[in-house]
Image (spheres, rainbow, N blue to C red):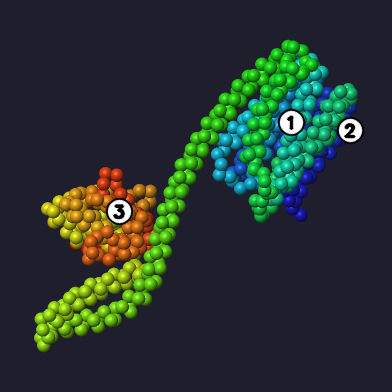
Amino acid sequence: MKLSDTSRWVLVASVAFLLHATLSFTLPEGYKLNVCSDILQTLFLLAIAVLAVRNAYQAEGPARAFWGLMGAGLVAWAGAQCMWAYIEVVHHRPVPDPFAGDIVLFFHVVPMMAALAVQPHRKAQKHKTYLSAIDFSLLMLWWLYLYVFIVIPPQYVEHDVTKYATSFTVLYVAENLAMLVALGSLWLRTKNAWRDTYKHLFFAGALYVISSQAINVAIMKGKYYTGSIYDLPFAASLLWYMWVTAVRPETRSEKMIYAERRGWDHGTVVSRLAMGAILSMPALAAWSTFFSSASRKICMFRLAISLEAIMILAMVVFLKQFLLDRERMTLLRQSEENLENMQRLHVQLIQSEKLAALGQLVSGAAHEINNPLTAILGYAELLSSDPSVDETAREHGRKIKQQTRRTKELVTNLLRFARRSDTEKTLVNLNAVVENTLQLRALERRESSGVMINRDLHEQVGWVWADSTELMEVCFQLLGNANDALQETGGGTLTVRTRQIDGWVTLEVLDTGPGIADPKRVFDPFYSTKRLGKGPGLGLSACYGIVKGHNGEIHCENREGGGARFVVRLPLADPNASLLSPSPASKILS
C-alpha cells in the first residue's frame, strides 16, 4: 500500500522525534549529547527552511510571497541555530550570554509576520504592493527600535547580563505572541483551504513559545543542558513546522473558496498598526525620560535612540504620503476618464435606443405609406400627361408628381435606415473607400468654388471587416456634409485623415466651416441645420447605425480653431489580413 504525502511526512516526523527522545533519555549529560542534539535540531531547521523555499518556488502569486517570506524567517532561524551548534560542537564550550545569534533569532519572526500580512487566502487584490511594503518596513523598523531600546542598554551600556536576559526574553516572547495573535485571527476568519495551514502554524508556534519558556525557566533554575528533556517539546514544534511546510495543507483542498468575514481589511489593519507603532515611540521616549527607574546613562541612550528612530520613520512616512498622493492623483485622473467614458456611453445608449425605437416605427409605417404613394404618383403622371385637361391642371399634376417622388424618396430612406438585416462583411481597406468616395462626389472639381481638399491618408493603415458599400455611404455622407458647410461660408479647407492607433482604424473628416450648433444632437433622427429641402436629417443617423453595426464608434465635436471634426473608429482586422485579396471596395473606380 502506497503512503500518501501526509502519512509519509507524519512517519518521518515521528521517527525523528523518537530518535531525539531516545538520545535524550539514553545519553548522559555531556559533549556527546550536545553534539547529537545540536545536529538534529540544526537539521530540522535547515529542512524546514529548504521546504519553505521550495514552496515559494512552486507557488504563484500571493502564495509565493507568503512562502518566500516564511522561508526568509526560517533561514534566519536556522542561521541562529547553526551559530549555537558551532559554539557547542566545534569550540566545545557553552553558549555565552549575551549570545551573538540572539539578534538573528529575534528578527527571524519579522519576515514571518510579514508573510501573514500578505494573506494568500484572499484573491489577488488590485492595490499598490509598494504601499504594503512600506507598512511592513515601518513595522520591521519598529521591532528594531524596540530591540535597541529594550535589549541593547543592559547588553552594551551597563553590561548587566541578568537584565539583558530578562529584557530579551520578554521582548522575544511578546514578538512571538503577536505572531500567534495574527495566526489565530487568520485561522478563525479564513474559510478556505488556507485555514488548515494557519491552524497548524498556530499550534506549532504555540508549542514553540511554551517550550522556549520552559527552557528559560530551566536555565534560571540551573537544570537545563542541550539535549535534555526540555528540548523535546522544542523538537516537536520544529517537526510540526516541518510537516506544515512539507505537506502544505492549503493545497489539499480541490475547491478554493475565497470567503472571509466582512469588516476587516488587512491593508487597513497593517497600516493602522504601522501608524500605532510610530506613535508609540514618543510615548516610550517620554516614559524613559520622566518615569523610568533606569540610570541616567540608559535614559539618555534611549532618548537619543527614540529621536533617531522617529526621524528615520518620519522620512519613511513622508515617502508613503508622497506615494499615496501620487496614487490619489492617478485615481482622480482615472475617475475623470471613467466619468467621461460613462457619459459618452450614456449618450451612445440613448442614441441607440432612439434609433431602435424609430426603426420599429418606420419599418412598419413606411411599407403602408409606399402603396398609396405609388397610386398618387401614377394618377399624377396621368393628369400631367392628359391632353384633354387644361394647362393649369397639368401643372398641378406635375407638382403633385414632384412632391410625391420626394415623399417616396423619403420613405425609401426610412426603409434603408430601419433595416435590420446583417450585411456580408469582407476585408476592406479604408483608404480605398475614401478615395472612391472622393471620386464619386467629384469634390476635386469643386475646388474652384473655394473648397480645398487635403488628403492625409496613412499608407500603413490596416484592413477592417466591413461592408464596403455601407462604409462608402458613411464617407459620402460625412464628406458631403463638410462640403455643404464650407459652401455656405464661401469655401475653406476639408481634411480627410486616416490612421491606425491601438488596434483601431480611424477616419477623421475635418472642415474649417462654421461648426456644429449642437454636437450632442447631430446624430438624432430628423435633426438638421440645413435649409428646408436640403435633406430629411437622416444621413448622420444612418451613419451612426452603420458604424455601430460594424462594432465601431463615431462622434463629433467642434474644433478650437473653428469648424467641425467627425471621427469614425473601426476595429482592426487580423494583422495578416492585408496579405489576403482586396475587397471589392478597392476595385471600384480603379
In the picture, which quadrant includes the N terminus? bottom right
Q: Nearer the viewer, mark 1 or mark 3?
A: 3
Q: Position of residue 119 (x, y in %)?
A: 65, 42
- Residue to which mark 1 is pinned: 175
Graded by Cα atoms within 10 Å as few (under 14), some (14 to 19) or many (20 or more), the crowding at tag 3 reads few
Residue 25, numbered circle? 2
Work out whether residue 142 can be spotted: yes
Query: Relative to the observer, which residue lies in front, 356 or 208?
Result: 356
Distance between the alpha carbons at the discs numbered 3 and 2: 98 Å
Q: Is residue 74 above or below residue 589?
A: above
The residue at the point 29 percent across, 53 percent down is 516
The residue at the point 23 percent across, 72 percent down is 406
In the picture, which quadrant includes the C terminus? bottom left
Tell me: 381 left or right of 180. Answer: left
Q: Position of residue 392 (x, y in %)?
A: 12, 80
Work out whether residue 467 can be spotted: no
The mark nearer the N terminus, 3 or 2, is 2
Graded by Cα atoms within 10 Å as few (under 14), some (14 to 19) or many (20 or more), the crowding at tag 1 reads some
The residue at the point 63 percent across, 46 percent down is 122
Tell me: 510 left or right of 1. Answer: left
The mark nearer the N terminus, 1 or 3, is 1
Distance between the alpha carbons at the discs numbered 1 and 3: 71 Å
